[in-house]
Image (spheres, rainbow, N blue to C red):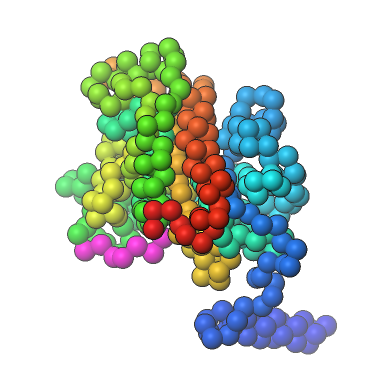
Amino acid sequence: MFLERKNLSILVFTFFLILGDVYANKNIPFGVEFEASENAITVKVVVVTMFEIGEDEGDQPGEFQLWKERQRLNVQIAFPHSHHDLFYNEDTQVLGIVTGIGTAKSASAIMALGLDSRFDLTSAYWIIAGIAGIDPEDASIGSAVWSSYLVDGDLAHEIDPREMPDDWDFGYFARSTTSPFDPNRPEPTGEMFVANPSLRDWAFELTKDVDLPDSKSLEETRKLYTEHPNARKPPFVLKGGHIAAMTFWHGEILNEWANRWVAYWTDDKADFITSAMEDTGTFQSLEYLDRIDRVDKNRVMVLRAGSNYTMQPPGMTAAENMFRENKGFAGLDASLESLYIVGSTVLESIVSNWDEYEDTIPGS
């Protein structure tokens, strides 16, 4: 029995050595398991959402429901190897996915989809559409933000602030460095991704003048931010940097950290505006899938809409404001509508101009 197990282990080990050589040697083609089947479902646009609150239709919507209902994603496709079944429109060839919350779920769900031979995703555009915390220094809840620079807020070193050196502002700092915001920063290896800036700019120009929903309740929340003029504006469309972290952080101090962290990793090319959990995991999988020609990472767009502010207003502590928001984000419904209004404008432009955009990426 021991010899049988030993021989089996040797066979498995040898198999993975050979498999590793296949992957490492670019002159050796990948196996057919990574190719779409002859009868694969063609996809023009993938709408990537992260969560749904209850049912997929007919109740309080999460990120997916408006897309499913209004884009008529009525063909349900079993997806048992991930978080949630897929939904497809056969006429428009639009596919909707719900990845689950957090970078681990988003990365695994996108990888599962990308390697699924039932789908031809080689020319597909990806619209990541989710709610986010939004920096009151830059915009108001309900506003929609197109992002190209995606910064990871988890991959780092950390020392508890109660034990950090007195001259440090934060106990969080990049790997392979010796202090927060060390100028001798290494090149990013997962700390930052860049989604096609030209495509982002095209999407922004197409949607920058779109009217976004407003309400009395949004206005009442905006009025609390007496020291932030942009937070008091009605919702609008803008561009800005995004940070993804598994921890739902909140407060003025961490908001300052997020601004500096995004500026640090992007060499001041982007200003922090939105915060969520998934987008670096999603883009990491898309980057890997691009290497084997399953997807085109240059066709990825990231759209986030502010459901809540990332810090408290004057006269309130960070804890008080977080607990208040946890009872129900003040901008949830408005942000979901903004996501759909802005995102669907881009989606419908791509689908209706497919003869051009199948081969030529807009903005290129």
What residue appears at the point 22 percent right and 44 percent down from the top-left corner? 169
Residue occupying the far right of the picture: 1
Q: Nearer the viewer, residue 84 or 7?
A: 84
Q: Is residue 187 magenta?
A: yes
Q: Position of residue 151 (x, y in %)?
A: 37, 51
What residue appears at the point 29 percent right and 33 percent down from the top-left corner? 138
Q: Which residues are magenta?
A: 184-190
Q: Position of residue 58 (x, y in %)?
A: 69, 25
Q: Nearer the viewer, residue 66 or 223?
A: 66
Instruction: Inspect this view and state whether residue 347 appears.
Output: no
Q: Nearer the viewer, residue 339 or 156?
A: 339
Q: Quadrant of the N terminus?
A: bottom right
Q: Position of residue 293 (x, y in %)?
A: 55, 69
Instruction: Inspect this view and state whether residue 59 appears.
Output: yes
Decide: is 114 above or below 228.
Answer: below
Residue occupying the far left of the picture: 167
Q: In the picture provided, is 352 more to the left or to the right than 309?
A: right
Q: Is residue 237 magenta?
A: no
Q: Position of residue 36 (x, y in %)?
A: 68, 66
Q: Nearer the viewer, residue 145 or 359?
A: 359
